Image (cartoon, rainbow, N blue to C red):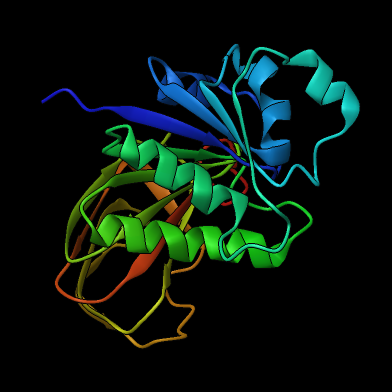
Amino acid sequence: MIRSTYTILLGGALRLTERLEKAVAGSRFIAADGGMRHAAALGAVPELWVGDFDSTDGELLARWPDVPRQPYPPAKNETDGEIATAEAIARGADRLIFAGALGGERSDHALQHLFHAISLAMKGLDVLLTSGDEEAVPLLPGHVRLDLPQGSLFSIVGFSALEGLDILGARYPLNDFHLPFGSSRTVSNVAEGPVEIHLKSGKAMLLARPYDFSGA
């Protein structure tokens, strides 16, 4: 099945990497406020630019005069990223990449991106969050496979207690494991190649650092 992929450009840190380029190849783009600054590096021309534009300076506005803008007042009920996501879904997106979603100066925004990603995955969308250096994939009951270089770091952070957790293809595998909520047991694992996760119940996030071999 051909997926309709949209990349949402967010305001967090973003480094152009081979994995990032491959992930967004063939994608359509929507920029959320200051996330527009990543468009040039990605060679992308977003089809829409939304937000209250409080993180966008005059130089950035002047650089992209032909991209349609959809402005919102600063006093609104959603973040610029959530508005951009809704626009992508309205255009038929079933796969979403959030570029610039991790790290950055605002921990509240970064944390909200993770929870938002979980909620989208619960609705059946395929979701990836990335900074280029780091990637995050929601984990729900079922299985997820992530191609990671051998020796690279990854962690699983539970957003609830996890039941029936299997970790395959890792230095520290688990089988049918119960992970209590708040446990750090699944932080800082090392990929031995592609990693496969099975989960019977619970919600979590798989966070990977494909270019970090400090645990090797």
The residue shown at (18%, 76%) is: 201
Q: Is residue 111 above or below residue 31?
A: below
Residue 152 visible to an observer of this rendering: no
> Within the image, what quadrant is residue 91 found in?
top left
What residue sits 51% from the left and 36% below the top?
8
* Above or below: residue 100 compared with residue 20: below
Q: Quarter of the image holding residue 127?
A: top left
- In this view of the protein, can residue 170 be seen by the observer? yes
Residue 168 position within the rendered picture, expressed as x and y whole percent measured from the top left: 24, 54
Location of residue 198 in the rendering, given as x and y in whole percent from the top left corner: 18, 61
On the picture, is 210 further left or further right than 13? left
Q: Quadrant of residue 116?
A: bottom left
Q: How many marks?
A: 0
Q: Is residue 113 left or right of residue 85?
A: right
Image coordinates for residue 112, horizontal then vertical, percent? 55, 64
Residue 66, compared with residue 4, is above or below; it is: above
